[in-house]
Amino acid sequence: MQIKEINIKNFRNISEIHFFPNENMNVICGENAQGKTNIIEAIWLFTGAKSFRNNKDTIFVKFGEKKAVFDCSFFFKGCENKIKIEIEDNKKTCFLNDKKLSSPALLAGTFCSVLFSPSDLSVVKDSPGVRRKFLDLSIGQLYPQYIEILSSYTRAVIQRNKIIKEYKYDNTLSVMLDVFEKEIAQNGEKIINYRKKYIKILEKYVPEIYNGLSCGKENIEISYISNKNCENLLENLKISRKLDMISGVTSVGPHRDDIDFKINGISGRNFGSQGQQRSIALSLKLAFAEVLKEITGEYPICLLDDVMSELDPKRQNYILNHIKDWQVFLSCCDPANTDGLISGKILNIENGGIKE
């Protein structure tokens, strides 16, 4: 997949930008608050997804203007397409090849991109819930049926939690507990299988990518940590009833699982440096791009927002020069970070425009 031309007008602090991207590396360079991330964000919105920064469309429109308009022409699977997005009066209108779409979500699958932003570091640093969400979002993009399975599971857990809080007052609710525990067990086993399957897919790509980022000095291992009581989930849900009635929550099931990252055998979450943790998060995103390439036959657009921070020069060099055959848009603040760029285009951004 490749973008041939981009136009952005009245989007956040951007008055008007027009450029023809390089087919491989495009570095968007400038000081803070000049518009670098706004360009990354505009490209991301072509996927039909919501902003990775906020969901208030009125903030997208440049102060003093009524409407933001941005479009791009791109090649995907041998065909040239054009997407245009207009934002006015808190409403987003999307066009694909000049045809108005009923919903921005319909752009999904037409324009594919993978995004890394600083918030993705939470996958490594934060609670298990963040890592489960990362897994679920990734799997849902690959296997749409997973979304319904996860929704059904979550609804059943919520219902069980309500019942166990009331059970001590009405033990006739045991029949309802049986029903919801059976649903939790059936869908929970499916969720665990999907997650383990996706971890195996990641294991095909993440170690090689991370090894490249570390110049062969570090190895990474990924493992899925499943609650030991998930092996016989239905049976263990019944066993845990008494304790769950005290806590008021369901204590067993894949909603309590986690992922572990080890660098040279040591926990990346607890002992990894900022650069190592950023490298883990980046490796996960680049691996997902490889998975999409397997499915669609083409690499998605790669969007890397503020990825160079806290990375040593060797890791920066890998990003600039060793992501091959992809079109990459990378934002950075320090011009010195681009000194090692062998081939590509540098866009210097100042006050929402391209500095000549």
Image: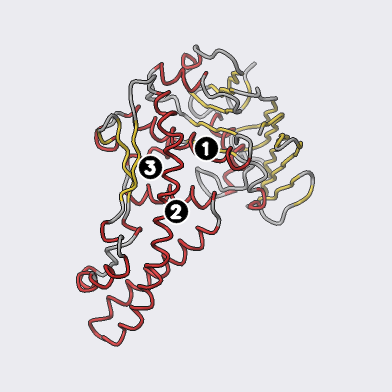
Cα distance between the residues tagged 1 and 2: 23 Å
- Residue highlighted by disc 3: 123
- Name the residue type under label 2: Tyr
Task: Please state if 119 lies on the left or on the right of 232 as rendered.
Answer: right
Neighbourhood count class around disc 1 (C-alpha, 10 Å): few under 14, some 14–19, many 20 upward? many
* Residue at the image position 22 percent from the left and 68 percent from the top: 247
Instruction: Place residue 5 in its image quadrant.
Output: top right
* Disc on the earlier residue, 1 or 2: 1
Residue at the spot of label 2: 194
Q: Residue at x 20, y 73 (%)?
A: 242
The percent coordinates of residue 296 (x first, y second) are: 63, 41
Q: Where is residue 28? Give x, y as percent.
A: 56, 24
How far separated are the C-alphas under marks 1 and 3? Answer: 14 Å
| Residue mark closest to the camera, 2 vs 3 | 2
Q: Residues within 10 Å of mark 3 (few under 14, many from 20)?
A: many
State which quarter of the image contains the C terminus.
top right
Q: As shown in the figure, which amino acid type bears the numbered disc 3? A: Val
331 over 154 or under it: above or below = above
Residue on which disc 1 sits: 115
Q: Nearer the viewer, residue 135 or 188?
A: 188
